[in-house]
Image (spheres, grey):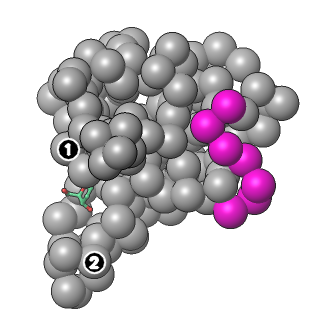
Amino acid sequence: MDKYELIRKATHARSLSYSPYSHFAVGAALLCKDGSVYLGANIENSSYPLCMCAERNAIYNAMMDGKSKDDFEALAIIADSDQPCSPCGACRQVISELFPEEAPIYLANLEGDTKETLIKELLPFAFSGEDLE
Ligand code: THU
């Protein structure tokens, strides 16, 4: 599956967003090496800190189906943003632990702008489990 098809899946995920408070819908699609794709969208709550981002929902969705880091091949994220939508800090931390460092992350917006990156570019010098040893 190429990056544009994965971004299309993320666009579909975005349509499932529940974001009545921010009105900022985000979609994510996580491609696995076996070809399966797991979707995530941001799900908000009237108790704002309980809002969950699209990227984390996609990763957690895959893990609840038995997938893990080594199964993941690529991640696409899309929102109606001026620049290709970039993950928030919390999602960067989760991606750094649960998503492979060599796997591409495709950022996109509705204008068709895209950017390809890696988690080490998004979160250099990340805190990790090794720091707890
Ligand atoms: N959001 C995401 O889903 N992913 C990000 O990386 C950026 C922020 C969501 C959270 C909240 O529901 C809305 O976008 C506005 O911050």
Q: Gap in Å between the C-alphas at discs 2 and 1?
A: 16 Å
> Does ligand 1 reach within 8 Å of label 1's beta carbon?
no
Q: Quadrant of the C terminus?
A: top left
* Residue interval drawn in magenta: 64-70
Please name the amino acid that badge 2 sits on. Leu
User: Which residue is pictured at 19% across the width and 75% down the height?
Assistant: 49
**Is 94 in front, or is 112?**
94
Q: Quadrant of the N terminus?
A: top right
113, above or below 6, in the image? above
In terms of secondary structure, where does tag 2 sit? helix
User: Which residue is pictured at 20% across the width and 44% down the height?
Assistant: 89
Residue 22 sits in quarter: bottom left
User: Which residue is pictured at 65% across the width and 14% down the height?
Assistant: 2
User: Can residue 132 be seen in the rendering of this structure?
Assistant: yes
Q: Which image quarter has ligand 1?
A: bottom left
Mark 2 closeness class: few <14, some 14–19, many ≥20 residues within 10 Å: few
Q: How far across and down, in percent of the image, does residue 45 sit?
A: 28, 81
> What residue occupies the far front of the structure in this picture?
133
Question: Is most of the magenta stretch helix, strand or loop?
Answer: loop
User: Which residue is pictured at 27% across the width and 16% down the height?
Assistant: 121
In terms of secondary structure, where does tag 1 sit? helix
Please name the amino acid that badge 1 sits on. Gly
Q: Which residue is mark 2?
A: 50
User: Can residue 7 be seen in the rendering of this structure?
Assistant: no
- Queried whether the magenta region covers residue 23, the answer comes back as no
**Is 4 in front, or is 115?**
115
